[in-house]
Image (cartoon, rainbow, N blue to C red):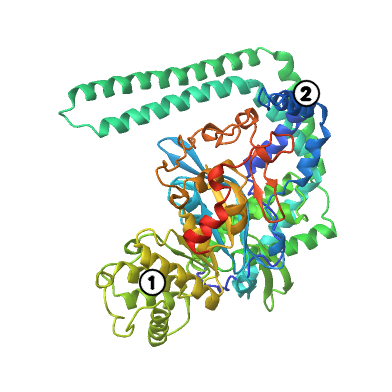
C-alpha cells in the first residue's frame, strides 16, 4: 500500500450544532441492550409497584417525631412530589441571567473514577454545569471534594489511573468550528471502498428484527446457565473484598524491614489467610456455575426447542438479507462515508486507517441491530466508539468536504486533538509555580516555546510577544530579565510568569488551581488583581479552584460548592454568601475566622467526608449534618431551585420538610464579610 501523507485539515469549531448527550456504545453493549430488554420488561410492572410502596414508606418516615403534621402531609399529598419534580432543573443547571451569554463549556452527568489498589474510587459523581463565556466562576470545597479532578477533565490531565466513566464535556469555540478536508486521489479510493462496505452492511438492516430475536434467544440460554443476579453479586463482593484485603496486606508488608519481625510474621499470616479466602471464593463461584450447568444440561426438552427455534430464525434471517438496497439507504451511506473521512482526516495515514476500520466495525454492528442512523444522537453514539463525529454540511470529493464537529472532551482519545485544545484554548495556572517551570531553562525560552508551538510565528516575533506579556503581568525590566532562570525570580514573580505562559496563546478558559496558596497575603492580593485585570483585556473565562472563601468573594461572579464529588449548591456569589441554603455551605461559612468573636471557639466541621470507594446512600453530608432528616440517610436529594440563578441539593428545601433556620453566626454575615474582605 503506498505511503502518502494526506492533507491534515485544522480542527475548527466544536459545537456549532446543538450537541446531544452521547455515550459510546460498543458492540457488546449493543448486544446486551437487546438481550436484557425482554427480561427487563417482564419485571417492569412488579418493580414499579414495589418502588411506589417503598417510596411512600420512606417518605412517611422522613420527619422527626415532633413533625407529625409533616408526615401526614407526605402521606396525603402524593401530587406535590410531581410538582417538585417539574420545578427541578434538568440535566444542566441553567442561569437565566446568563442566557444571553454563550455557553463555552457544558458538562453533563459527569462521572470520573480511579483505579486504586484493586478498587474503584468515584471522585466525581454526576456533575452537570454550564460555564459561560467571559464569566468568573469559583469552585469551592474541602480538600478531596473533587475540585481539581473536575477541572483536570477539561484539559485531559487526569492521572494515568483515572478515567471518565460517564457523561460529556462539550467545548464550544468559534475558531474550532468548521472542518474542511480536500481528499487526495488515494483518499477517494478509500472512500469508494468505504461506500461499498456500507452498502453491503446495509443489507443486514432488512433482517434486524430477526437478528434481535436470535440474540434474545441466545441471551436467554446464557442467562439460564449463569448464576442468578443475587448469587453473582454475593460471590463477586466476596472476591473483590478478598482481593482488596490481600493487596492492602501486601502493600503493608512492603513498608516493613527485617527488624520488624513480629509485624512481618503477622503480615505474612494475613496474606496467607486472604489468599485462602480468595481461592475459596473463586472455587465457590466455579462450583456454583458447574452445578447450574449440570441442571441446565439435564433439561433435554429445552435443548430441542432451542435448536429448532434457532434453526428457524437463522433460515429466516438468511432470506431477509438477500433484498435490494433502497435509495434512501444509498444516500445515507454516501453522507456516512463523507462523515467518516471528515472525522479522521486530520490524522496521519496509519492512524486514519485504524480509525476508519474501527468506525466501519461499529457501523456494521449498528446496522445489523437495526439502529436508526438517521437520528443525530444515535449516530453520535456510534461514532464515539472510535472518534468524535464531524457532521457533513456540503462539498464534494472532487473539490473539498466541509463539516462541523461537536467536540466532546470526555471522548477525546488522541494527543493531536489535545494539542489544539490544551494551552491554546484551555490553560491552567497551578498552585506551585516551581512545578510548572523548568529550573534549567530560561524564563524567556519557556514562554517563547509555547508561543511558537501554538502560533505560526518566528523566534523574533515570539520574543517580542513574550516580553510584552512579561510587562503585562508586572515583571519589572522585562527585557533584561528575559534570559534569567526561575531561581532568580521571587515566588510572586514566578507565579506571574506562569500566568504569562498560560495567557501566551490567549486561551478561552483559564483554570486557576489555587494559584495564591503558596504566596504570602500581600502577594496574593496582587496576583488576584492581576488575573481580574487581564481578564478585561483578554476576555477569558476564569474557573477558580479554592477553599479560601475570601478569594471567592473578591474574584467570582458565580460559586459552585462541591462535596464528595457533587455540586451541592450553585449560585451568584452574593446568593451563596448571604443566602446559603445547603447545610454544608452553612458549615463552610461558619468556619470563617473573620466571623469568630472574642473568647469563642472557632467553628469546625465535625467528622470526615465519606469514602468514595463505596456507594453513597442518601445525602453524602448526612453523617456530618447537625440538621439531618431521616430521609437524608435514605434518598439522595434532588437539586432544588431557590431562584432563577440559585440551586441547592438538600431535602431542607422540600416544602414538606420542617423549617430550619441557618446558624446564628452567619445570619448577619453581610456586614462582617463586607468589612473583612472589602467586597
Q: Position of residue 654 (x, y in %)?
A: 71, 38
Judge the density around disc 1: few (<14), some (14-19), many (≥20) Cα neighbours within 10 Å: many
Q: Is residue 284 above or below residue 111?
A: above
> Dot 1: what SS?
helix
Q: Residues within 10 Å of mark 2 (few under 14, many from 20)?
A: few
Is residue 480 left or right of 389 when viewed as pictured? left
Residue 410 in sight in this render:
no
Camera-side residue of 426 and 602: 602
Q: Residue at x 33, y 72 (%)?
A: 493
Which residue sits at x=60%, y=16%? 292
Residue at mark 2 to residue at mark 1: CA–CA distance? 63 Å
Q: Position of residue 625 (x, y in %)?
A: 55, 35
* Residue found at the far front of this picture: 598
Quarter of the image where one finds residue 447:
bottom left
Q: Which residue was labeled with disc 1?
A: 496
* Marked residue nearer the N-terminal end (2 or 1): 2
Image position of 252 with respect to 587: above or below: above
Q: Position of residue 275 (x, y in %)?
A: 36, 22
Residue 194, image quadrant: bottom right
Cβ–Cβ under 8 Å for marks 2 and 1: no
Residue that badge 2 annotates:
46
* The one of 464 and 348 positioned closer to us in this rendering: 464
How many numbered markers are drawn?
A: 2
Residue 255 image position (x, y, % from top left): 25, 34
Find numbered disc 2 in the image and state the secondary structure of the residue it sits on: helix
Amino acid at each position: 500500500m503506498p505511503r502518502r501523507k494526506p492533507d491534515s485539515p485544522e480542527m475548527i469549531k466544536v459545537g456549532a450544532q446543538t450537541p446531544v448527550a452521547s455515550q459510546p456504545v460498543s458492540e457488546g453493549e449493543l448486544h446486551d441492550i437487546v438481550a436484557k430488554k425482554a427480561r427487563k420488561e417482564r419485571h417492569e410492572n412488579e418493580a414499579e409497584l414495589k418502588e411506589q410502596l417503598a417510596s411512600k414508606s420512606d417518605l412517611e418516615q422522613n420527619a422527626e417525631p415532633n413533625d407529625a403534621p409533616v408526615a401526614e402531609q407526605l402521606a396525603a399529598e402524593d401530587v406535590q412530589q410531581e410538582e417538585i419534580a417539574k420545578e427541578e432543573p434538568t440535566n444542566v443547571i441553567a442561569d437565566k441571567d446568563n442566557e444571553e451569554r454563550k455557553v463555552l463549556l457544558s458538562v453533563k452527568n459527569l462521572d470520573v473514577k480511579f483505579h486504586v489498589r484493586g478498587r474503584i474510587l468515584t471522585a466525581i459523581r454526576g456533575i452537570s454545569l454550564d460555564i459561560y463565556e467571559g464569566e468568573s466562576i469559583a469552585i469551592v470545597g474541602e480538600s478531596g471534594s473533587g475540585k481539581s479532578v473536575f477541572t483536570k477533565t477539561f484539559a485531559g490531565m487526569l492521572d494515568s489511573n483515572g478515567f471518565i466513566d460517564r457523561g460529556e464535556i462539550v467545548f464550544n469555540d468559534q475558531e474550532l468550528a468548521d472542518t474542511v478536508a480536500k481528499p487526495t486521489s488515494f483518499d477517494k479510493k478509500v472512500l469508494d471502498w468505504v461506500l461499498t462496505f456500507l452498502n453491503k452492511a446495509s443489507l443486514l438492516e432488512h433482517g434486524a428484527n430477526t437478528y434481535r430475536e436470535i440474540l434474545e434467544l441466545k441471551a436467554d440460554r446464557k442467562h439460564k446457565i449463569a448464576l442468578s443476579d443475587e448469587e453473582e453479586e454475593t460471590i463477586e463482593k466476596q472476591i473483590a473484598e478478598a482481593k482488596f484485603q490481600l493487596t492492602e496486606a501486601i502493600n503493608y508488608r512492603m513498608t516493613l524491614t527485617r527488624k520488624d519481625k513480629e509485624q512481618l510474621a503477622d503480615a505474612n499470616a494475613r496474606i496467607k489467610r486472604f489468599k485462602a479466602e480468595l481461592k475459596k471464593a473463586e472455587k465457590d463461584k466455579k462450583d456454583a456455575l458447574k452445578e447450574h450447568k449440570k441442571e441446565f444440561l439435564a433439561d433435554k426438552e429445552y435443548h430441542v426447542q432451542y435448536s429448532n427455534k434457532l434453526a428457524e430464525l437463522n433460515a429466516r434471517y438468511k432470506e431477509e438479507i438477500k433484498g435490494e438496497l433502497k435509495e434512501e439507504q444509498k444516500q445515507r451511506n454516501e453522507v456516512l462515508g463523507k462523515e467518516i473521512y471528515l472525522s479522521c482526516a486530520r490524522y496521519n495515514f496509519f492512524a486514519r486507517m485504524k480509525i476508519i476500520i474501527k468506525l466501519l466495525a461499529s457501523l456494521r454492528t449498528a446496522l445489523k441491530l437495526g439502529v436508526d442512523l438517521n437520528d443525530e444522537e444515535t449516530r453520535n453514539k456510534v461514532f464515539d466508539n472510535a472518534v468524535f463525529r464531524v457532521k457533513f454540511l456540503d462539498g464534494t470529493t472532487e473539490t473539498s468536504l466541509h463539516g462541523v464537529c461537536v467536540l466532546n472532551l470526555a471522548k477525546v482519545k488522541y494527543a493531536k486533538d489535545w494539542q489544539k485544545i490544551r494551552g491554546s484554548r484551555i490553560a491552567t495556572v497551578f498552585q506551585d509555580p516551581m512545578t510548572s517551570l523548568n529550573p534549567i531553562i530560561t524564563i524567556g525560552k519557556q514562554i517563547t516555546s509555547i508561543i511558537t508551538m501554538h502560533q505560526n510565528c518566528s523566534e523574533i516575533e515570539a520574543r517580542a510577544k513574550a516580553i510584552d506579556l512579561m510587562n503585562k503581568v508586572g515583571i519589572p525590566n522585562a527585557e533584561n530579565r528575559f534570559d534569567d532562570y526561575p531561581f532568580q525570580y521571587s515566588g510572586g514573580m514566578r507565579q506571574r510568569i506562569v500566568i504569562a505562559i498560560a495567557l501566551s496563546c490567549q486561551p478561552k478558559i483559564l483554570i486557576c488551581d489555587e494559584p495564591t496558596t503558596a504566596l504570602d497575603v500581600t502577594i496574593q492580593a496582587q496576583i488576584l488583581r492581576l488575573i481580574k485585570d487581564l481578564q478585561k483585556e483578554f476576555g477569558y473565562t476564569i474557573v477558580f479552584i479554592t477553599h479560601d472563601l475570601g478569594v471567592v468573594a473578591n474574584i467570582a461572579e458565580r460559586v459552585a460548592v462541591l462535596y464528595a464529588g457533587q455540586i451541592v449548591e450553585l449560585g451568584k456569589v452574593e446568593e451563596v454568601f448571604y443566602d446559603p441554603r445547603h447545610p454544608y455551605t452553612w458549615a463552610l461559612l461558619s468556619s470563617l475566622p473573620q466571623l469568630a468573636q472574642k473568647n469563642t471557639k472557632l467553628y469546625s466541621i465535625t467528622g470526615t467526608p465519606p469514602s468514595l470507594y463505596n456507594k453513597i446512600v442518601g445525602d453524602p453530608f448526612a453523617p456530618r449534618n447537625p440538621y439531618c432528616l431521616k430521609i437524608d440517610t435514605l434518598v439522595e436529594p434532588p437539586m432544588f431551585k431557590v431562584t432563577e440563578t440559585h440551586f441547592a441539593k438538600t431535602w431542607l428545601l422540600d416544602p414538606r420538610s420542617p423549617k430550619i433556620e441557618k446558624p446564628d453566626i452567619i445570619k448577619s454575615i453581610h456586614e462582617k464579610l463586607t468589612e473583612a474582605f472589602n467586597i
